Structure formats: structure tokens, C-alpha cells
Image (cartoon, rainbow, N blue to C red):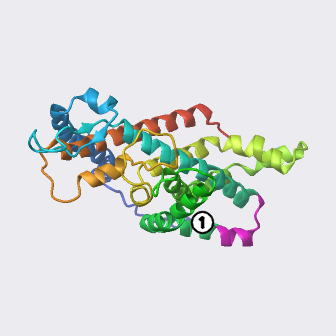
Amino acid sequence: MSKPSLNITKAVRPMWLDRIVVALLAATAGIAILVTVGIVLSLSVETLQFFEKVPLRDFLFGLKWSPQTAIRADQVGSGGGFGVLPLINGTLLISAIAMLIATPLGLASAVYLSEYSTKSMRAWIKPGLEILAGIPTVVYGFFAALTLAPLIRMTGGQFGFEVASESALAAGIVMGLMIVPLISSLADDVINAVPQSLRDASLGLGATPSETIRRVVLPAALPGISGALLLAASRAIGETMIVLMAAGMAAKLTLNPLDAVTTITVQIVALLTGDQEFDSAKTLSAFALGLFLFVITLCINVVALHIVRKYQEQYD
């Protein structure tokens, strides 16, 4: 008795349809590159016009930032300064304070959530940290300007320190609290991605849980943690509202966290606020600052990639 034949019709997709889909996916992947190239080109054109008015050497190595130039030479303020070093000083000072606050708090909370906390505690703490990440930066700025800055000034005055009404310390502390959820969330995901077999092997060899975390878990998660820290540093460098409201707009070369300072992003906002003449050196300097900030961010990403490649390990 012969077996009944099965008539199965296979749907054959035409090759041209696959090629169209692949082309669309490639175009989608290239959007980020095209946007980046467009940003660089738009900034570069205006920046070249700025360097026709102000020498590159004066911009990179100048010690004075005072872009309020006058139209005529006999007017007050005609001798402006476009040295970026005071702005770099303020940016790095506030970002360093923020990272000193956020790094231990973020990593400690991530280790606790991933290694020590119970499920019920994690269910309460992790959403609470993520809520902090959703608070608008202007709210953090109000808190820094109205609460923390007066507290620092009053406390410093009691110990004989001269504290400015707006200080880098107030802005750095609040900025550090703002980026704690970012570090904690990213580091928590990275630590949880470490295979459980590594923990079991370390505990089986007689190591304590704390030794396992220090010598096994954290080294295994180091590339991801490094990336999280550098991402947080980029976030701190690009912050504007907290610095504007808590640190002021004084361009100074100082390492004193109790002084008022300013950053690159704050000056970009100040230069492009209101009606401006886009052919003046004052306005064009904002584009030069933007391109300079882009280069700084690019360097941070290159360093992060180097660290990840250097310390990355493969776990089966």
C-alpha cells in the first residue's frame, strides 16, 4: 500500500526583497554616523570663522575668558579674552568633585543590590534610585542654590573659610548625587552579568563573600564598570543647569572648590542666549567651545574603549 503524498508548498521570498531589507538596516545603522558627521561639519564651519578672528594659540592657551567685546575699539570692554583654560579648569573641577561623590556611592549601592540585598529590599531600593535619575536637573539646581550652597557657606564661615555664595563644591556635590543612579544601575547590570559559576568556585575554595566580590566579581566586571564611570563623567561634563544655578559664571583658574567657577556648557548657553550677531567673535566662540567639548568627549570614549579592550576577559 503506497503512502499518501504530501503536497507542501514552500513560500519562496524573492532575493530583491532581502536586499532591500538589508539596505534599510544598513541605512538605519549609518544614521548615527551621519548625524555625528553633520554635527562636526556644522561646528567646524563656524569654528574656522572664529579662528580667523581669534588665533588658535590664544584660544587654547589663553588664561583669560572675557568674550564681552565691544564693537568699536574706543568702547569699554573692547579688549576681550578668549582663553579656554579657565573654562576647562571649572569643568574638570566640578566634574572631579561629582565623580568623587558618585563613584563610591554608586558602586557600593550596586554591590549591595547585586550581592547582599534580599529580593524585597531590591524591589524597593532599585526603583527608588531610578526615580532619582528622572528628576529634572533644574530641580537639582534649585536644591543646590537654595539649600546646599547656603549650608556650605555657613559651615565654612564657622571654621574660618571664605566661601563664595556660589561654589564649585555645591555644584559638584549635587551633580554627584544626580549621577549616582546612573552608575548604580549600569554597574548593577554588569555585576549581575558575571557568571554565578565564578562565585561558586571562589566560595568553594574557601573565600569569604567579601573576598569573592573583591577578587573575582569586581575584576570580572571591570570593563563594564569602567564604561559606566566614563559615561557618568561625560554626563557630568555636559551638565549645564546645576552649574549655572550653583557654581556661577566666574571664569577663574583655581583649584579651590569654595570659589565660584564656570564651565564650557554654561558659557555656550550664555553666549547663544538672546539676540546675537553671528559674525562676531563673541557668538562664534560658542561654536568653538562646542567643537572643543566634542573633542573632549571623543577622547573620553577612546580612553574607555582602550580600558575595556585591555581588561576585558572572556568567560565561558
Q: Residue 14 in the image: x percent, y percent?
A: 30, 54
Q: Is residue 29 visible?
A: no
* Magenta-drawn segment: 116-125
Give the residue furthest to the top.
57
Q: Nearer the viewer, residue 35 or 287?
A: 287
Give the residue furthest to the right.
206
Q: Under tag 1, what secondary structure? A: helix
Q: Is residue 253 visible?
A: yes
Q: Nearer the viewer, residue 62 or 17?
A: 62
Q: Amino acid at mark 1?
A: Leu
Q: Residue 34 in the image: x percent, y percent?
A: 27, 45
Q: Is residue 302 above or below residue 134?
A: above
- Report the residue at 42% width, 66% height from top: 138
**Mark 1: few/some/many CA within 10 Å (<14, 14-19, 20+):** some
Q: Nearer the viewer, residue 308 or 268?
A: 268
Q: Main secondary structure of the magenta part?
A: helix
Q: Quadrant of the N terminus?
A: bottom right
Q: Is residue 122 magenta?
A: yes
Q: Nearer the viewer, residue 298 or 254?
A: 254
Q: Residue 88 in the image: x percent, y percent?
A: 40, 39
Question: In the visual, does 239 lie left or right of 50?
Answer: right
- Report the residue at 80% width, 46% height from top: 212
- Report the residue at 36% width, 52% height from top: 249
Quarter occupied by residue 269? bottom left
Q: Residue tagged by mark 1?
A: 129
Q: Quadrant of the C terminus?
A: top right
Question: In the visual, does 26 lie left or right of 156?
Answer: left
Q: Is residue 285 magenta?
A: no
Quarter occupied by residue 124? bottom right
Q: Residue 301 in the image: x percent, y percent?
A: 45, 39
